Image (cartoon, grey):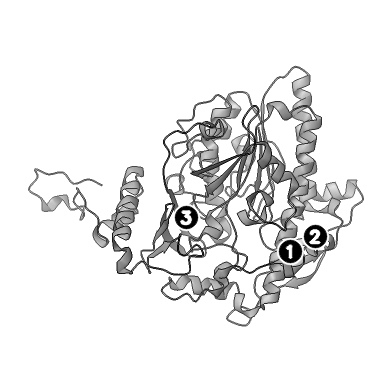
């Protein structure tokens, strides 16, 4: 199995998902050769919790790795001892495991602790000072990392904002993305050679690119690859934040969106597209190597991302406590040898479902991936009963901020306990500009969605439902006060 993953990657940057401008031939070919999932979502739009859900097949509230360690505000920083992971199960069953690229799955425990071979590349962005990368440059007489022309806004206190983009003065062969693809190809060759030598061990090899996560740091050819005039700014740049949770406007100020011009925003999106093309080319190198090694007809290939990115949508950058499609819907492509080509599936599926799919492909037990469901029946063209919704959660980044979301075909409900709740009519308002939570015309829909979300949370054991019990129009069958001492002893309270 070959698992290709990007970070903070918008669906609308790929030709296979309808972008008429971006050049992504390798990922487009993967879509044409396999299955494209059109309703593929992350369980949470933040790196570490999403990646932990992929590793464990468990929802964030269950595996409890709820925040990126760089902004951690008191949550766990590593998975608990004994937590199930697909990698440890595959390793116990004789698989060779490799991981090249972003780990971001904890502080004290590295990918090696879960059975993966590969350099320990810690952090949230390209670690360009890593000894293995520096050795790669030295071996090939390539120039070191150097950037100019940083792009930043201005934060509310007048200081420079976060770096959004910069020009990289290195040839493409020296980029961290090229380095990751090269190291992947080397490991792919080694795994194939071991098989030829009679080892016969199957492999799971993952390449986790750090991009196109901001800042977009690219060589000239990619930085200027796309004309900003091709970029149509999303309708949601007209966001007023009226009737929205105030935290969204605070995040807009943090990312200094309003301190930059519309032309600068177009340029940033154009550079983001260039980043996507650079990564697509490196994926092409990996896929070509796989074919040259004769592995193509017996290797399943995944492509997905941990979550999306705003790139100016809703006057925001990065991701955060706003459960919009821009950061929750992600690309999902899967090619299985012998499977149908060019198939498009509309079912709601999740990054977490990759876990059971990986195990299913290996002929391994999928049950321990408790919140995951194998996608292989969908890939085979079957039509099993499938949920008509996506349930997502968020727990905070710079500060605790719990949210739960229920997304159906036509509507989205977001519960924000400390703030305004949100309800969007996605048919009438696909850009999610108008919060209609208090609209009497949608009262019945709001009630039905609230009850459905409540029931799902209780079924899962997500204690977020306790807040909903007294606050919203839901029926209940338990002592909501959890005060067993108040009854006469004949009834038992439970949670």
Q: Which residue is mark 2?
A: 222
Query: Tags 1 and 2 in contact by the CB under 8 Å rule?
Result: yes
Residue 271's disc is: 1
Along the polypeptide, which appears first: circle 3 or circle 2?
A: 3
Residue 232's disc is: none
Classify the position of the N terminus by image quarter: top right
Q: Is residue 493 left or right of residue 11?
A: left
> Quick one: SS at disc 3?
loop
> Quick one: SS at disc 2?
helix
Nearest the viewer among 226 and 472 is: 226
Q: Which residue is mark 3?
A: 75
Residue 94 appears in the figure: yes
Q: Is residue 71 above or below residue 49?
A: below
Picture coordinates of residue 277 (x, y %)? Answer: 75, 54
Instruction: Count residues near mark 1 (Cα–Cα under 10 Å), then give few for <14, some for 14-19, many for 20+.
Output: many
Mark 1 vs mark 3: give the one in front.
Answer: 1
Q: Is residue 42 above or below residue 340?
A: below
> Quick one: SS at disc 1?
helix
Residue with the most extreme left position: 488
């Amino acid at each position: 199995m070959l698992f290709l993953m990007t970070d903070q990657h918008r669906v609308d940057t790929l030709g296979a998902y309808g972008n008429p401008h971006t050049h992504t031939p390798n990922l487009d070919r993967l879509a044409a050769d396999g299955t494209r999932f059109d309703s593929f979502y992350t369980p949470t739009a933040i790196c570490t919790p999403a990646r932990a859900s992929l590793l464990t097949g468990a929802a964030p509230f269950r595996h409890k790795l709820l925040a990126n360690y760089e902004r951690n505000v008191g949550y766990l920083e590593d998975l608990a001892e004994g937590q199930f992971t697909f990698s440890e199960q595959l390793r116990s069953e004789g698989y060779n495991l490799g991981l090249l690229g972003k780990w971001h799955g904890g502080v004290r425990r590295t990918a090696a602790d879960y059975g993966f071979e590969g350099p320990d590349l810690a952090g949230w962005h390209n670690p360009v000072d890593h000894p293995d990368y520096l050795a790669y440059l030295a071996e090939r007489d390539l120039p070191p990392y150097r950037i100019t022309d940083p792009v930043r806004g201005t934060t509310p206190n007048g200081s420079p904002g976060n770096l959004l983009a910069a020009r990289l003065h290195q040839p493409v062969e020296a980029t961290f993305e090229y380095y990751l693809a090269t190291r992947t190809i080397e490991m792919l060759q080694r795994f194939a050679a071991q098989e030829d030598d009679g080892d016969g061990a199957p492999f799971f090899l993952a390449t986790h690119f750090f991009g196109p996560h901001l800042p977009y740091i690219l060589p000239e050819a990619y930085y200027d690859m796309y004309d900003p005039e091709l970029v149509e700014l999303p309708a949601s740049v007209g966001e007023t934040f009226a009737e929205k949770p105030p935290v969204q406007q605070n995040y807009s100020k943090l990312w200094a969106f309003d301190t930059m011009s519309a032309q600068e925003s177009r340029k940033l999106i154009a550079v983001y597209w260039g980043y996507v093309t650079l990564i697509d080319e490196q994926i092409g190198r990996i896929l070509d190597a796989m074919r040259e090694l004769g592995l193509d007809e017996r290797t399943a290939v995944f492509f997905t991302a941990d979550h999306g990115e705003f790139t100016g949508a809703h006057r925001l950058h990065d991701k955060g406590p706003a459960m919009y499609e821009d950061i929750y819907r992600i690309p999902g492509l899967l090619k299985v040898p012998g499977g149908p080509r060019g198939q498009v599936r509309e079912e709601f599926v999740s990054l977490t479902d990759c876990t059971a799919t990986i195990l299913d492909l290996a002929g391994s037990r999928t049950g321990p991936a408790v919140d995951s469901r194998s996608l292989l029946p969908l890939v085979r063209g079957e039509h099993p009963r499938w949920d008509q919704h996506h349930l997502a959660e968020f727990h905070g980044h710079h500060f605790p901020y719990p949210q739960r979301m229920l997304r159906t075909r036509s509507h989205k409900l977001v519960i924000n306990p400390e703030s305004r709740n949100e309800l969007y009519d996605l048919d009438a308002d696909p850009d999610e500009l108008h919060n209609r939570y208090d609209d009497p015309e949608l009262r019945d829909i709001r009630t039905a969605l609230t009850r459905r979300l409540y029931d799902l949370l209780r079924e899962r054991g997500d204690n977020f439902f306790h807040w909903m019990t007294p606050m919203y129009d839901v029926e209940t069958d338990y002592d909501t006060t959890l005060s067993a001492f108040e009854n006469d002893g004949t009834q038992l309270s439970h949670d």
